Amino acid sequence: MKKQIPNLLTATNLFFGMVAMVFIFIDNLTGAMIAVLISLVMDFFDGFVARMLKVQGPIGKELDSLADMVTFGAVPGMVMARLIHESTGGLFPPEQITLSEGFPWFLLGFLITILSAFRLAKFNLDERQSDAFYGVPTPANTILIFSFWMITEWRPDFWLSNVLNNTWVLIGITAIASWLLVADIRLLALKFKNFSVADNLFRYILIGSTVILLAIFQHVGIPFIILLYLALSLVENMMKGSN
């Protein structure tokens, strides 16, 4: 029974990923956001509990990736598809898909889902990712995509909302986000081997900056946190490369 506790948490992640999909279809941003937040918590604790109970196993690892494929693959792809379709003046979900009404650009949002699948497969096989990430983690990408929906929905007067209502901007973001998921770029992981400032300087800067940006700007600060995360990772890589 003890071995199934982490798997139950993973299953809960999957369940709320499906709940989030339903909320996306019925245009309930708050419900979708809460469901994804619950999934994020479950995704963190399933591995933590497995290590604490010493019941890690191959089934749990595979189940975790399958659950993440829904919550952090299908869900952000669907959100991006929604944003792209609405930017063209359409209602989501569309009643029908016909080329006679123009190319269904919203389908390009599912590139995020496809590349998320590659990202998760790569993570399971890449032994370098024990203390760092190579490519943007799918949960971070999901948070980023969700923040775009929150900004356009809750802050329509904000300048970034106007930018995100442009179809070509969204398609460009989709292409970049999809590439970053599988790019062979070393990125920070919040995995502390010790709490030394010297060894974890960039992690502490990221955590501190995240708290400040969220406290001041709330969800509007999320895209800038992701940009800061990428920038800090690149700076750390350059510093390590020069040593």
Image (cartoon, rainbow, N blue to C red):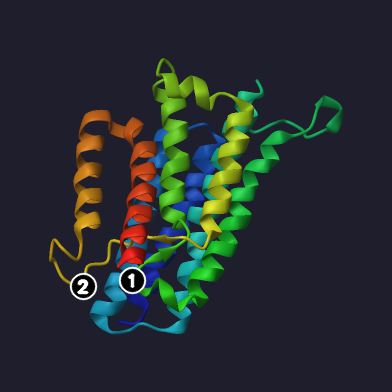
Give the camera-side residue of 132 and 153: 132
The amino acid type, in three-letter code, at marker 2 is Lys
Instruction: Give residue 170's quadrant in the image.
Output: top right
Residue at image coords 61%, 25%? 87
Where 12 sits versus 34, above or below? below
- The picture places residue 61, in percent across and down from the top left corner, at 45, 76
Residue at image coords 41%, 45%? 143
Q: Which residue is mark 1?
A: 131
Count of picture labels:
2
Give the camera-side residue of 27 and 172: 172
Question: Among all residues in the image, which is located at the extreme right?
Answer: 100
Quadrant in the picture for the C terminus = bottom left
At numbered mark 2, what does the secondary structure look like: helix, strand or loop?
A: loop
- The picture places residue 134, in percent across and down from the top left corner, at 45, 64
Where 56 sits versus 77, above or below? below
Quadrant in the picture for the N terminus = bottom left
Left-right relation of 123 to 30: right
Q: CA distance from mark 1 to mark 2?
A: 9 Å
Instruction: Give residue 73's quadrant in the image.
Output: bottom right
- Circles 1, 2 touching at the beta carbon (< 8 Å): yes
For the question of whether residue 10 can be seen, the reply is: yes
Left-right relation of 6 to 213: right
Give the camera-side residue of 182 and 22: 182
Q: Which residue is mark 2?
A: 193
Left-right relation of 87 to 76: right
Where 86 sits versus 45, above or below? above
Residue at image coords 54%, 34%? 26
Question: Among all residues in the image, which is located at the extreme front?
Answer: 242
The amino acid type, in three-letter code, at marker 1 is Asp
At numbered mark 1, what does the secondary structure look like: helix, strand or loop?
A: loop
Q: Residues within 10 Å of mark 1 (few under 14, many from 20)?
A: few
For the question of whether residue 92 can be seen, the reply is: no
